[in-house]
Amino acid sequence: MIRAHVLICGGTGCTSSGSKTLQEAFNKNIADFGLEEEVKLVQTGCFGLCALGPIVIVYPDGTFYSRVTADDVKEIVEEHLLKGRIVERLVYRDTGTDEIVEKARENVSLNDTAFYKSQKRIVLRNCGVIDPDNIEEYIAMDGYAALGKALTEMTPEDVIKVVSDSGLRGRGGGGFPTGRKWALCAPNKADQKYVVCNADEGDPGAFMDRSILEGDPHAVIEAMAICGYAVGATKGYVYVRAEYPIAVNRLQKAIDDAKEYGLLGKNIFDSGFDFDLEIRLGAGAFVCGEETALMTSIEGNRGEPRPRPPYPAVKGLYNSPTVENNVETFANIPQIILKGVEWFTSMGTERSKGTKVFALGGKIEHTGLVEIPMGTTLREIIYDIGGGIPNGKTFKAAQTGGPSGGCIPASLIDTEVDYDNLVSIGCMMGSGGLIVMDEDSCMVDMAKFFLEFTVDESCGKCTPCRVGTRRLLELLDKITDGKGTLEDIDRLENLCNYIKQNSLCGLGQTAPNPVLATLKFFRDEYIAHVVDKKCPAGVCKNLLSFTIDPDKCIGCGKCAKNCPVDTIVKTDYVAPGHKLASYKIEQAKCIKCGACMSGCKFGAITKK
Amino acid sequence: MKSLAELKAIKDRMRDKIVIREGANDTRVVVGMATCGIAAGARPVLNAFVEAVNNEGLYEKVTVSQTGCIGFCQLEPIVEVFEPGKEKVTYIKMTPEKVSEVVEKHLKGGKVVTEYTVASAN
């Protein structure tokens, strides 16, 4: 009889930090100690604390081990699983001083950590709990009960009404009311209608949808079938990028299992409703995350957007009425059907209900995946859940929404995060990538980074986006090279507005956002680049110079050895108290790589 | 899948296999599994508890786990039962046979089996 479960994270993050070898080590050690009949090993989806991976959790006590290596496994099996003694040195402990953390420190359970306490996991409820490859574990957690309820107890109109009343809005970033989308599609008559799931998550730094598909694929399948029933569609496609192999494999296994159990296919729950689902792999073009380009790509054509209207609800995939929702949006649906409107609307703010999943990245202690109720402040996300900024640095801004989004400066850290608040400060929710920046980040450089991305990813169909974004990038290059003028800043702003107004699809319409947001909140940094020819954060190479303080330099010569372009030379000057002559950097040949500075043990080299 | 009953049957069958991951229940049965405990036969006792709790359908209420040396090595195998709002009960010199009695009378019936408790040792 099984008395303990060992859960090993099999998400992308922990897989790349070695969770596969852990599984083998556990299997071997469990066998060596003769515990096969007593301990069960389970591979789950993402637990969220990717920075501390690979993660292992032992139930029933919920002990949370982080950064486990294969060498630690024998100790966990022998001490914890056999003898019942927790391996203290591997247990994750919160760092910090506030009360919640102090209290959590006494416990070892995952759910008591500050990282988890402030979260509300609805979409991620099964991630890190069930084995995503086991349909019966999903069913044990009330899986497919919502589909059963919808098909046997509700009319399609009832389903749409519940989704509408819940106030659920599109989690892909736009925030369009999901219920209204379904209601627009439902009355349209056609031989074949479609449900499409947009899993073409393309923002740099975003991994929410990927983690949901890896950790709880059946939730998306169930929701798509419910949507099909509500709008009268019998065929669905999940469009997911081929570069998400774990997600694709688990989703395919989940679809196959659902078909075998009769939860997809003909006459589901004896209701007369048929629903079939297929995966379509995307090749990774960012524009295919735009709904019309995505459908063009499913049809087998080059992924380019088409003008709207007509909207997909009227003329979508193969010119048929189509509902397209994002992975996270779908993952909310079964819970809403099961637990009801009142439960869902009890979370969130006036106009944004429920929760939002964010992928925390950048300069933050707990890189990972979190789910918070709408209306949580940015401060809580970054400091309480995210653990703050590493190395004692100061928070400068958070970038949301990737290449389509904007940034929230430190002065607005108490903003309650929901769709409308973010729009009102000139930002956007986006799909959930949240990149944290500290004092060492240059905002002009950040805008340039995203522009480089959109220039690469512009499909080229319309001129404002194809040509406009490239001109924007050239202007930013000029500014970061120290050749910009004040007029260039105005030109930048005008061009941004032009591209926004005239581009065909969302990619172009939002591409200037990173520039506009940084201009709004960090205009002084742009001005420093063009007027003072300085990069205040010390990032833009052409505006930097490295210098050696001759009085601190002991003349060891390490910098000269490290220099890849041999531009550091010995001088005649010997500082008082030193035996050897100091070095200096010939600026003309310097490539500003910083190798000299990082190698100097005496703090003699500075960057300005 | 033809009916909700069919779905529920799978759920019921799977429930006891997954409930353990929802974290510890209010009532905890803790078996001392240090070297002394194991030598005295704590493993069959632990397994007997796990089995009995499952078979009696108590898994939503009772968590069975282990601990290290409780300190009374000559009285091992020792089992402690924690219930919310009640005094901790310590059973000593446990055997799989005694386990079924404790599960039946104490965990199900709410009545402490005093003849097996540490108080009876004197």
Image: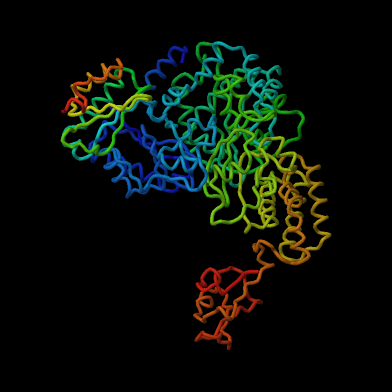
The answer to whether residue A76 is visible is yes
| Residue A6: percent from left, percent from top | 36, 36
Residue A177 falls in image quadrant: top right
Left or right of residue A559: residue A542? right
Relative to residue A34, is residue A107 drawn left or right? right
Q: How many marks?
A: 0
- Front in this rendered view, residue A489 or B74: B74
Eyeballing the image, is B98 above or below A456?
A: above
Q: Quadrant of residue A507?
A: top right
The quadrant of the picture occupied by the C terminus of chain A is: bottom right
Q: Nearer the viewer, residue B13 or A410?
A: A410
Coloring scheme used: rainbow
Query: Residue A427, relative to residue A452: is it above or below?
Result: above
> In percent of the image, x 42 and y 43: which residue is there?
A55
Looking at the image, which residue is at 53% across and 32% down?
A121
- Residue A28 seen in the current view: no
Give the residue at the far bottom of this rendering.
A572
Front-most of A489 and A240?
A: A489
Looking at the picture, tell me which residue is in the foreground, B70 or A34.
Answer: B70
Identity of the residue drawn at 65% across and 44% down: A400
Q: In the figure, is residue A261 to the left or right of A180?
A: left
Residue B103 location (% of width, % of height): 26, 20
The correct choice, above or below, for A522 with respect to A147 in the image is: below
Residue at the farthest front position: B122
